[in-house]
Image (spheres, rainbow, N blue to C red):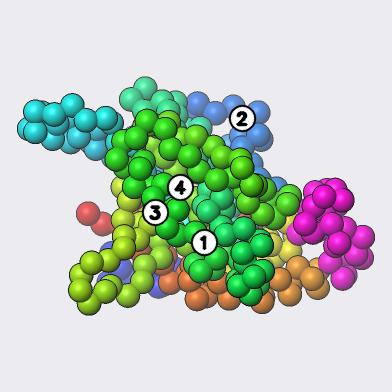
Amino acid sequence: MKQSIGNTLSPYLTFTKAEWGALRAGTPLTLSARDLARLQGLNEQVSMDEVIQIYLPLSRLLNLYVGMEQDLFAATQDFLDARARKVPYIIGLAGSVAVGKSTTGRILQALLGRWSNHPKVDLVATDGFLLPNAVLEAEGLMDRKGFPESYDLSSLLHFLSAIKAGKRSVSAPVYSHQAYDVVDGEEIRVEQPDILILEGLNVLQTGKPPRDGRAIPFVSDFFDFSIYIDAEKDALRRWYIERFLQLQKTAFRDPAAYFHRYADLSEKKARKVADDIWTRINLKNLAENILPTRQRADLILAKASDHAIEHVYLRKI
């Protein structure tokens, strides 16, 4: 993995955790231990040291980028003698199932929102743009859930287009992990944030460009910066199974949960079920659709087997 990212022909600058941590440059720690505990996902233990060494330098870098973008926007408005609505800075966050995207998104949202020039930071997951289960079942796509074809891409692109057009209020659908489905009639409102973090499996994916040059835009065309969270496949498999076993003892106990049928399995059988789901669906999606987009990211956070980020790869400018 490291050779494929950080070799001599790589477009990335490579940093160890210590080297990246040195770039904090006095950025204050604005998260408490209680804040961090609240932001962490199931089966993830992000240390305060990792916040200091990894997330504070990243917060500083993104703050610099956002500030430059805001200055460029203001200069362009002066040039055009216009007063357009502000346009949010959009950060795309990609990576496999169980790699920790949601936790990273929440930590970045908290840290970035503490900078004075962009206090309003929203986080949206593309899960809400999945097609409803009824549609997936009708089209034989339930075992392809999370694959590119399982999303309402048109709605996602319209959402991002409206955000980048500076619309005051844009709605996004809501997804329930408990019900394992889009919640009919529910939505969240995104109201002109300074920064929008869009988190999802396939947000960096592209397709074949059309011969007539009239392409429907890719999701990543709307990004100002993109992050890919990386880990070895064996680690991802283990993390997925461990999370499944924890959910079996908690969320799956609810009779309304989609996976309630697995709540009373023995640990051995539950491991087998989780391994089957991982291999048949998530690993396949990772190999076919997610991992091939890694090199498109502006920054890669590479995790070790204990979930800790050990290397950072920043695209050269």
Q: Are marks 4 and 1 in contact (CB under 8 Å)?
A: no
> Is residue 157 rendered to the left or right of residue 131?
left
- Residue at which label 1 appears: 151
Query: Label 1 vs label 2: CA separation?
Result: 32 Å
Q: Please identify, in this view, whether the residue under mark 4 or under mark 2 is nearer the observer.
A: 4
Which residue does the numbered mark 2 point to in the structure image? 35
Count neighbours of disc 4 (C-alpha within 10 A) and say few if under 14, some if 14 to 19, many if 20 or more.
many
Numbered disc 4: secondary structure: strand
Spatial CA span between label 3 and label 1: 11 Å
Position of residue 108 relative to residue 43, above or below, is above
Amino acid type shown at disc 1: Tyr
One can see residue 293 in this view = yes
For image coordinates 27% across by 30% down, the residue present is: 85
As drawn, 117 above or below 249: above
Mark 3 and mark 2: Cα distance apart in space: 33 Å
Amino acid of disc 3: Leu
Secondary structure beneath dot 3 equals helix
